[in-house]
Image (cartoon, rainbow, N blue to C red):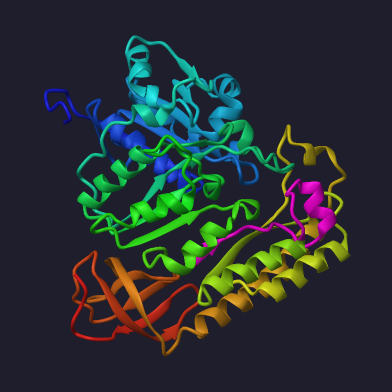
Amino acid sequence: MRDRMKELKKLFLKTYGCQMNVYDSERMTDIMGNQGYTMTDSPDDADMILLNTCHIREKAAEKIYSELGRYRDIKSKNSDLKIGVAGCVAQAEGVEIMARQPLVDFVVGPQTYHRLPEMLEKLNVGEKVVATEFPVESKFAHFPKRLDDRTNVTAFLTVQEGCDKFCTFCVVPYTRGAEVSRPVTRVVQEARELVGQGVREITLLGQNVNAYNGPGSDGQGWSLAKLIWTLSEIDGLDRIRFTTSHPNDMSDELIETHGECKKLMPYLHLPVQAGSDKILKRMNRQYTAESYIRLIEKIRSARPDILISGDFIVGFPEEDESDFQATLDLVEEVGYGFAYSFKYSARPGTPAAERMQVSEDVKSDRLQRLQSLLTTQQKAAQSMMVGRVVDVLFERAGSLAGQMVGKSDYLQAVHVANCDVPLGTIAPVEIIDTHSHSLAGVLASSSHQG
């Protein structure tokens, strides 16, 4: 239990990037809560400002320096304020951050934030700290119990971290390290804690989450499928999701689980990145467009109603028009309910950064054409929902009086007017209309699931 005798201080924590960073921020909040910190929504009255950064997007580091610059006046008025940078930018550029921005007091990588209490001791005596090593011990073994002040009915839960794939465009193996899977008992324990706080849906996270191989109670490495079946036995946990997956780790066992486990939702994020075998090879993705398409067919055979989403990179080095057309052809054949698409941007130190780059004008043109096709598919997928009855987990009040917002089984946002169900309710909803990024519905019956 938190030591109430400690003087409460205020922490302002800003999170960038992926769901794993959201999870990391929640755990840092737990750690700092045990050190006497409470959260604040404003940096102006904070005793500590912490930026949890992401290195995936273009010019990520420059955006962090710009953000830090906004805190210069706050720091000048409060000499006791501590400012820190966490996450992947911290891991990649820790020493440079301290050199370029002297107002930063500490830098902590994504594998060392469990040592924040030790860092506080040094910070409190005026030392500056850079902690970006990959420690021998796992950070997961040192996390405190989840604080019991959650209000969300959904939660992220990291079960696997790091990557051994070494895609030529990606910095993750260098910022998150090698693949590591958490022990089954610890995952289950944390899931039970979340459910005990009112969580009804958990999304299992990992850079390659379907490569999960955590030690189980039998001493053997458990697959993600086996972990999902174990979690499905937790009373009160009604929905399970996982992201992000690599096509090469999508096993037959996991595909069968999609078809058989009722608590595993019919949504799968399975990035392909490109439709050209030449580009896939240069990316070191280690599969072909044909093998990816056959994999999708197998998944849909097991779960016909599954919604597939994906990731795409356009303008990868040496991509020509025929390569890009192959990506469009793959999108046409697969049919995505949702997708993320980006222009390639070079990451220093990655192999792809050394190759001949595609011009920005060409990248912009291709991105627009790809996004147009993906948007058409997304709208079609949403239109097909009209007239259907789907279960919706209500997560929050809407912007209109009497309106509630939740997520369908397919992870689509659903708005329901004149809805008086409590937060956390799962209720059948008839979809009556679509919007650009959401669906509108009405409660399908007056008897709601509790």
376 left or right of 204? right
Q: Position of residue 106 (x, y in %)?
A: 45, 21
Report the number of discs.
0
Residue 392 visible to the viewer: yes
Toward which corner of the image does residue 170 lie, by quadrant? top right
Front-most of 437 and 224? 224
414 up-or-down from 214: above or below: below
Q: Nearer the viewer, residue 129 or 199?
A: 199
Res 292 → quadrant: bottom right
Q: Is residue 43 visible?
A: no
Tell whether 213 sits left or right of 218.
Answer: right
Magenta span of residues: 267-288
x, y percent for residue 341 = 65, 60
Identify which residue is drawn at 51% across, 64% down: 256
Q: Is residue 432 left or right of residue 370?
A: left
For the C terminus, the quadrant is: bottom left
Magenta stretch: includes residue 266? no
Spot occupied by residue 225 in the image (x, y as percentages of width and height)? 47, 54
Figure check: 335 above or below 169: below
Residue that protrudes farthest toward the bottom in the picture: 387
Quadrant where the N terminus sits is: top left
Within the magenta stretch, is there residue 280? yes
> What is the residue that sits farthest to the front in this orientation?
218
Q: Residue furthest left?
A: 5
